[in-house]
Amino acid sequence: MMGVAHALLSGFGRRAILYGAIALAVIVALWVAVRQGRQAAAANFAIRRADARLRSMQTSKDIRHDVQNSDRADLDRRADRWMRD
């Protein structure tokens, strides 16, 4: 009788260890996926922020160039139209 109980309990222990190992592996895999996702999102955000900064610098340069190369009458006309709108 004791041998049967021991066999059942030792089998249960092995199954518990197996299921525990599988659960641990799933948890670790999920943690790695979340961590990689966060790092990818942070890198994507940094790239988008740098692109936006470059676009704004280019726009500023273009506007500055337009203002410096325009004559006074054109600037007055543009300012009047801007104030009207």
Image (spheres, helix red, strand yellow):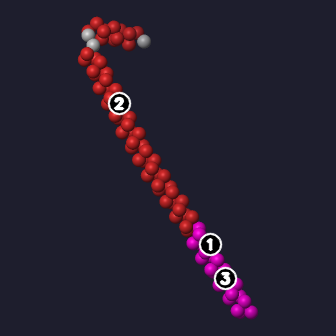
Q: Distance between the residues labelled 1 and 2?
A: 55 Å
* Predominant SS along the magenta part: helix
Q: How crowded is mark 3: few (under 14 residues within 10 Å), some or many (20 or more)?
A: few
Q: Name the amino acid, label 2.
A: Ser
Residue designated by label 1: 19
Q: Could you tell me how far apart the alpha carbons at marks 3 and 2 are, in whole angstroms?
A: 67 Å
Q: Where in the figure is residue 73, as x and y percent of width and height?
A: 28, 7
Q: Does the magenta segment cover residue 10?
A: yes
Q: Does the magenta stretch include residue 50?
A: no
Looking at the rendered structure, which numbered label has been put on residue 56?
2
Which residue was labeled with disc 3? 11
Q: Tell me where the magenta segment starts and ends, as one range.
A: 1-23
Left or right side of 77 for 3 = right
Circles 1 and 3 in contact, beta carbons < 8 Å: no
The residue sitting at 63% across, 80% down in the picture is 13
Q: The residue under label 1 is which amino acid type? A: Tyr
